[in-house]
Image (cartoon, helix red, strand yellow):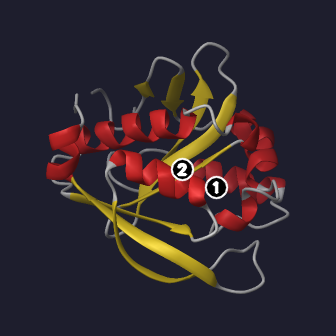
Amino acid sequence: MGAASEFRVETPRLALGPLKAEDGPALGRIATDPRVAPMMGTIPVPWPDAARALWIARSRFRGDVGFRLGIAGRHDGRVIGVCGLGGAPAALAYFLDPDEWGKGYATEAMHAFVSACFARFRWLDVIAADHFADNPGSARVLAKLGFEPTGRGMGRSLARLEPAPNIHYRLFRVAFEASHEIP
């Protein structure tokens, strides 16, 4: 798999890899879009250049959970989103450019990313995820991957004035391996 600094995943249409400083403007446009921002927990609106640059720098893969990758078109290299795995328990997070919604990119990227994470981190037995209740697109993506709902709660977003209902999920390695191929 290479050095600790390398974590790349390719699908037929997408390339997932390290975020670069030059991705900042595209990420700022996507993450602060009014359709995306309220679904994100920790990205402020507006998202100043310096804060975005720091977020990108802190996203680097260092050999363990706690990183993010850019999602780009495999043929044009244009960044269309981000995925990441962090926290304890390890939790999946992602966002995608609304201009690319409905094309299957989120499912394609998250399937490849989850597969790669389970393959790389052999100790990882379960991945958590959540989404705001008013985000049915994420519910569909997580269901396609095999995530099972575990409960409901209230979540915070820097782009929402008040806490909002969210739904919690988990995905066990054994369940994922039973229905998906892992490299």
Q: Residues within 10 Å of mark 2 (few under 14, many from 20)?
A: many
Query: Element type at marker 1?
Result: helix
Position of residue 138 in the picture relative to residue 48 (left or right)? left
Image-based side of 67 in relation to 165, left or right: left
User: Percent position (x, y) of residue 2?
Assistant: 30, 26
Q: Nearer the viewer, residue 87 or 170?
A: 170
* The quadrant where residue 38 appears: bottom right
Per the model, the C-alpha gap separating discs 1 and 2 is 6 Å
On residue 59, the disc is 2
Q: Residue drawn at (76%, 67%), measured in percent from left and top?
A: 44
Find the residue positioned furthest to the top.
75
Q: What residue is at 57 percent from the left and 18 percent from the top? A: 74
Pointers 1 and 2 in contact (C-beta within 8 Å): yes
Please state which of residues 73 and 53 is positioned toward the viewer in this rendering. 73
Left/right placement of residue 147 relative to residue 20 reads left
Q: Is residue 171 above or below residue 167?
A: above
Q: Is residue 67 visible?
A: no
Residue tagged 1: 55
